Amino acid sequence: MNANATTNSPLPETHIDDHFSGQQHDQPNVPLLLQPSYARSKSLLFDELRNFRICLKWCALDHSSCIGKLISYFIFVFLAIVVPITSSLSVKLSPSYASFNLLVQFPESCLALLGFFTLCRFFSQYGLRQLLFLDALQEDSRFVRRGYTRELDKAFRFLACILLPSFFVELAHEIFFFSRVKICLPYVNPGVPLNSIMFVLVLGSWVYRTGVFLLVCVLFRLTCELQILRFQGLHKMFEGCGSEAGEIFQEHMRIRKQLSITSHRYRFFIIASLVVITVSQFVALLLVLASKSDKSFLNSGNLVVCSAVEVSGFFLCLLGAARITHRAQGMAAVASRWHMSLTAAGSRQEKVRYHGADSSLLPFYKCGGDSDSDSSDILITIASSQDPSSFQTRQALVLYFQHNKGGITLFGYALDRGLLHTIFAFEFSLVMWVLSKVVVLS
């Protein structure tokens, strides 16, 4: 009996080791998203990634094999390039509507191109877990782990809130549009069947291009929200007042490295999207204001839907980056308040000991936050004299936070509220310039 117990006892440990080290047995050339060990995990958090996997499969972004890559590129070329060109050339339109249609098809295809190759690069090099920094989740606190599931659910809510309303408006516009136009293709008889086929292809092309662009925007917003959770965990390390300065420094270095990686991954997509959206919106504004033809849901409804989707998706990126940058810049104030709380507590203790009072009568000190914040429940007391080396370490940590405030950056420029104000002022200046040109031309 003892021999059997000794022989069988290591088996559960081997099973546990294989469960946590399953990543080592995966195929080295297959992206993490598509490896069998990540297909479904018992963890609720990793289980939530199934929604992203399903969404990616519907977008034909499975690059785990050569056949998958060929299908992905074929669908992209067909839905993002061939169908828009064919629909623009086959439908007989007035010159004014042709201009509006070109302003819709060109930016949608350009943004889909940016989103498609961005996603292809991400999932071929990193995988979904590494892209969202879920591989480092074991180093985070329980508070951060619980917050991840909520943020994963919110990501699809943002995607649904933008995609579903615009889809119904686009569906109504396409039904109204293809019931009134005539489509002419060589060697094909015009009629209701041809209009119906073109209607399905155009609607599928719009869903595909819009979904690919919004998916990248949602992934970026989700990455920023997950990093905000890590900053909240870092804030709680200050509130606890039991954490050493070295531990806080190491945690901030880890978060700052992840923010730097995120900035490098998405900076080209953000800048290119800003250029495409700015050019398309102001050219559309110029043509709409300068055009003498009547505007209706038939000739300009598609332009309104396209503009709303583009601006909404890009605002997701800007607001997510501004939030995480604001949170990163605010850590210097948190560190200063933490340093001041401990220094004041130590000074008070030295004063009490100088007057010969009992140290047990020392008051408690609240560490971090206002009275209405969560940190008001965390109290500390100083049980030993002020250590000069500890004071210098905390002072060095405060100086470090003051000189390392960066969050999401674009080639060295922090994407904070100040940059958002600059972008708004630039766009507003362009609007005023376009309006002046329209007044002169009219």
Image (cartoon, grey):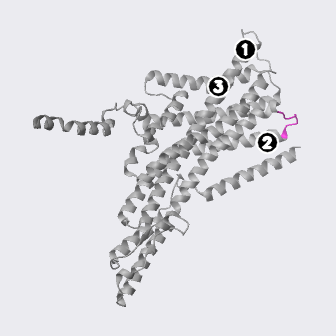
Residue at image location 70% in from the left, 19% down from the top: 198
The residue labelled by disc 2 is 286
Q: Is residue 295 shown in magenta?
A: yes
Q: Amino acid at mark 1?
A: Leu
Nearer to me, 198 or 429: 198
**SS for callout 2:** helix
Percent of width and height locating residue 86: 69, 21
Give the left or right position of residue 62, taking residue 17 as reference.
Answer: right
Residue 39 x, y percent position in the rendering = 41, 31
Q: Nearer the viewer, mark 2 or mark 1?
A: 1
Residue 280: % across, % down: 71, 39
In this orientation, does residue 77 appear?
A: yes
Q: Which residue is mark 3?
A: 204
Local secondary structure at mark 3 = helix
| Residue type, mark 2 in image | Leu
Q: Quadrant of the N terminus?
A: top left
**Label 2 vs 1, first from the N-terminus:** 1
**Residue closer to the observer: 320 or 81:** 320
